[in-house]
Image: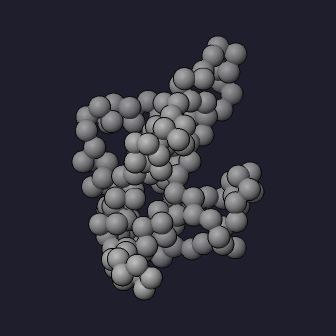
Amino acid sequence: MLPGITDEERRAFDDLFGEVIQSLPDAIHRLLEEVPLAVEDHPSQEVYDEMGLDPDDDDLCGLHTGIPITERCIEASGQVEDSLLIFRRGIIDQAGGFEPWIDGDSGDAVGGPDAVREEIRITVLHEIGHHFGLTEEDLDRLGYA
């Protein structure tokens, strides 16, 4: 079953998303002009299936589709359109939700709007990194995994 999202969560997320995008440096804004960036509630069941993920167990925060710039060649022109997809439900869940709480095991504060905002920032930069050819290992080293 695909995870749902409330209208309130959607509005709160979109407000934070706008703040994050506005706060990014001009150089990132120029990069975003090269590839469409869309926000969806969650991936389709087809995306989960293609990636071998279970929507009940796996959070997917974002997805780059297309061919990274570092791998493009003339033979690949017109194949798969580049896009960056950001998924509200995965980011909210990964951040711990909009309501802050204390993790009983670690005693750490989890969730809240600041955590969601940071997860949005990380996810957007992560997917931009994939568009420009960075691997998961590269992104992990940079702190965007």
The percent coordinates of residue 76 (x first, y second) are 68, 21
Pick the front one: 11 or 16:
16
Give the percent coordinates (x, y) of residue 78.
Answer: 66, 24
Residue at horizontal 33 percent and vertical 36 percent from the top: 28
Give the colouring mode of the picture.
one colour
Does residue 86 lie above or below 14 as drawn? above
Q: Residue furthest top?
A: 74
Determine the residue positioned at 70% across, 60% down.
53
User: Is residue 98 at all visible to an observer of this figure?
Assistant: no
Which of the pair 111/107 is nearer the observer?
Answer: 107
Left or right of 61, for residue 12: left
Horizontal and vertical percent for residue 63?
56, 48
Q: Position of residue 100 (x, y in %)?
A: 34, 79
Residue at the location (50% across, 34% down)? Answer: 134
Give the number of marks: 0
Where is 138 relative to 34, above or below?
A: below
Relative to residue 81, is residue 38 drawn left or right? left
Q: Quadrant of residue 16?
A: bottom left
> Above or below — where is 5 with respect to 71?
below
The single residue placed furthest to the bottom in the displayed view is 104
- State the quadrant of the N terminus: bottom right
Who is closer to the viewer here, 132 or 107? 107
Looking at the picture, does residue 7 appear above or below residue 133? below
Please report the residue visible at 49 percent of the width from the left and 70 percent of the height from the top.
Answer: 93
**Residue 114 in view of the camera:** yes
- 16 to the left or right of 9: left
